[in-house]
Image: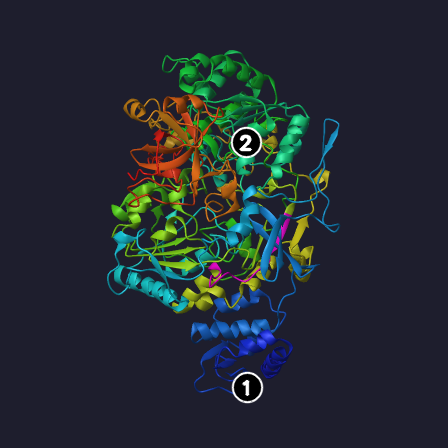
Amino acid sequence: MALESTQFSVILFGLEKVLKMTALRSATFAERLKEKNLIAQIKLRDNSQGRYFIFKEGKVSSKSGIHANPDIVMSFEDAATAVRIMSPTKTFLEFISSAKSFQLDMRGPDELSLWFAETLNMTMSLKPDYGVDMGGGVKRYTSNTNGGPVFVYVKAGKIIRITPIDFDEEDADPWVVKARGKDFSPPRKTTVSPHTLAWKSMIYSPNRLLYPMKRVDFDPKGERNPQNRGISGYERISWNEALDIVANEIKRVKKEHGPGAIMNGSGSHHTWGALGYWLSARLRFFNSIGWTPVVHNPDSWEGWFWGATHHWGQSARNGGSEFYNLVEDCLQNCEMMVFWSSDPESTSGVYGASEGTIRRQWLKELGIKLVHIDPYYNHTVGLLGGKWLAPKPGTDSAMVLAIAYVWITENLYDKEYVDKRTTGFEKWRDYILGKEDGCEKTPEWQEPETGVPAKDIRALAREWGRKKTYLAAGGIAGFGGACRTATGTDWARGMVCLMAMQGLGKPGINMGSMQQGTPVDTRFYFPGYAEGGMSGDIFGTGNFLNLYQRMPNIVTMNTVKQGVPRLKIPEAIMDGHCEAYNADATTIEGQFIPLKYPTPGYSPVKMYYKYGGSHIGTMVDTNRYVNMYRSDGLEFVVNQSIWFEGEAQFADVILPACTNFERWDISEFANCGGYIHHSFTQVNHRVAVLQHKCIEPLGESKSDIQIFLELSKRLGLGSVFSEGSTELEWCKRLFDGTDLPHNISWRKFLKKGYYVIPPLPEDRRDPVSFRWYADGRPKDTPEPFPAPADYTEEYRMGLQTQSGKLEFEASSLKRYDPNDPERPPIMKYNPAWEGPHATELFAKYPLQLVSPHPKFTFHTQSDGKDSIINDIKDHRIAINGHYYWIIRINPQDAAARGIKENNLVKAFNDRGAVICAAQLTERIPPGTVHSYESSAVYKPVGEPGKSPDLGGCINLLTPSRMMIKKSHGMAANSCLIEITNWSEEERV
């Protein structure tokens, strides 16, 4: 140990010199030294060796020995550990391992401890060199968004434009698919979604929250006036006051009420970045304080998760499909594509920008027939053309049965495949042929239900049965679409059953819309945001798959075993109890477990910390959420938001967050990870991005990470939260955990800002999804699902179901509740509980509203806030100075109500009313109306929660009833309303 002891002494002696030298080289570092006056002791735990450092008025000095009363103490178990950890070449694995084993300890106030640790780290990483000088005072940076990666051009500290990324000569060449005598290859650039191009206007929006705010009639030590949330105004306060209020409230509710009193909820999405997204820093902070999480429903999968899972497994994908090398298979073998409740040109799959557009245009180039089934003549059929069938909302499952009827009676299905690869077909066949209930499910039977002529169904079934067909069910395979109706489970189950009849996995027969399945390199590791970033959360994220082994950090864990179902938050607060079912995707049976609030022994929720997004625009029957905020069930509400919109106006204290263009982060184009494993196969080029801090945060806004860190310091958790790393250092830590260091240096990645991951050569591409299953081979697609225990006989042989096969009669439902009328073991037709069969309600509200995801905003993110998106005439309409949300109505229905183009109308039912601008169009059939969900603006004309909304929150109207009782799933597209003309003089 003598050598290590000497080395430790030398390191400590040299540290003073390093600090002084760094201050001489860097004015920024010199200024930093002026920030704190303190004495920092570095020593061995047994006090046998040490040195203390005196920081005073920007000067540094040190003395050997042990100080009697230092401000902070950094101690090591022994000299060998100290030498290893203080070496510039240390790894974070060594650092974390030492800290977890208490071989390294830090004592003293968090504020000073963190400052000292960060200062030491800065000596090894001064101001980073990043971005590309474009001349003329312009510098080009990189960032990433929910709609694709971008170049960001900055001049004089202000963003002047944002563009997609054009590749340079160093970047990898794209893949090439050879099909039917042609070569298909994407351009050497990225694309973006329309809403990405609005980011400049969003960053400089007049609705930006630039300072901490407090509701004027909220007094944390006196009257709180919860009834005035959403009505009373706000006053600007300092960060110190705001943080002190929030930190003191965290302490108070825990002390007064016990564990579980603090609830945190987020949207399903946030501003992009593996570190800044909602599954990263947020979880790290709340796990540290103990919290009641808002438990998400599988809101993009609904019917797939609660229904389709039982027929083919895929639980880890929430009931959706795997999607490997589908683009090549489709171009080479497919003869027809059926887009069923699928509009990828609007939704871009998920985060997929406009990458799939060129690939779908290749379908037309090859003459592949296209059919579209949707109540709305959507943007995909508008671009590509093809046959359009428009069923009444919620009746798709009747159409499924009628198609299967034609296949059965005319021998148009793959009998050999059904015999070898499926079970339970006879049971479903007998139901379809009427042997169970005396009713044959013929095309004529479905016509009065769906409104689609029997001849069209018969023609579609015959052509489908004779051609190799891809089924594009939802925005990506098993995602979105008609799964959000009262019959969503039946529709999703039906999609799987139809493909089982036709030979899922055979050449040209698969699930997909050309939105996913590009031949990119899936073996190159870069984590998606769902893998948890800096969260340290193994159980609440996909961290356990890969990242926890690759990026060492201290594991975090929430000790509160209580949750609130997101669709039942208002009931939890106002009624004091609620119940739903767990969306546990680890195995099929995970969804059978009830989720009850409150959990015995835990406190009811008393404080709500809302983070990002707005439930008012995105959940269902959302006047409930408004009324919840204004009840006395919540003692304190804090909202951490970028803009003053949606739920921010119901907070007691508002903490202003900056955008991802104003902070550091790291990410990959369209990479979710976790629940959409290998989601980057949506893009034409895998692109890893270092998200540069392009500009300083506007006003006094801070990054989410910095806000959580400042709160952590006040709770004595600063070191636990940050581990002594800055945001840029966390980026480097994640970079080191990927495969990037084998291909590009950190210095070059930092400077350039992105790296194009080369595609694999043709002979090493992934196998086609389900080809292994169709051929009866072991699974060979590169996904780690299902877990080994979920295979019935042999690992990687068969599907996740009990039989290991596609099941027409679901064994899991037979075991769970074979007599459930809403979800019987075989897929049947159950009319929607809100629709034409609800006779009395239908007489009162005769229009069926569909409210899919919008094309021009990513949920609420790009709407409102004076964004340029408002000027798109298919998004909002400016009337008398206000931008109104649009509702689309057939001219026949409009004429019957005296409604003309751009009239202001009131869309209403018993749940609420929304004022919209009418758009008359033949793109929607009579009896159905169309209005996108996700308005960011909530602007009631009178009392919040009890008056019409001028903002366009169409989800005020949608039902809060679960799609089936034993679920936690919304049925927003089973919604009856009426529409009348409205004048601005009306206020009721």
Q: Quadrant for the N terminus, please.
A: bottom right
Image coordinates for residue 704, horizontal then vertical, percent: 47, 59
At label 1, the amino acid type is Ser
Point 59% across, 29% down: residue: 383
Tell me which secondary structure the magenta stretch mostly adopts: loop
Q: Is residue 719 magenta?
A: no
Residue beneath the point at 54% across and 82% down: 58
Using the image, determine if residue 888 lies above or below residue 649: above
- Name the residue nearer the viewer: 31 or 818: 31
**Gap between marks 1 and 2 measured at Cα:** 69 Å
| Res. 345 in view | yes
Asked if the magenta segment contains residue 688, the reply would be: yes
Residue 915 located left or right of residue 4: left
Give the residue at mark 1: 62
Tell me: residue 137, above or below residue 922.
Answer: below
- Please give left or right for residue 607 compared with residue 165 in the image: left
In this picture, residue 143 sits left or right of residue 623: right
Name the residue type under label 2. His
Q: Report crowding for label 1: few under 14, some 14 to 19, many 20 or more residues within 10 A (C-alpha).
A: some
Horizontal arrangement in the rendering, residue 831 relative to residue 727 (left or right):
left
Q: Is residue 524 visible?
A: no
Magenta residues, start to end:
687-704
Residue located beneath label 2 in the image: 379
Q: Secondary structure at mark 2?
A: helix
**Image coordinates for residue 605, horizontal then vertical, percent:** 30, 53
**Which is closer to the viewer, label 1 or label 2?**
2
- Does label 1 or label 2 sit earlier along the sequence? 1
Horizontal and vertical percent position of residue 131:
65, 59
* Secondary-structure class at tag 1: strand
- Marks 1/2 in contact by CB < 8 Å: the verdict is no
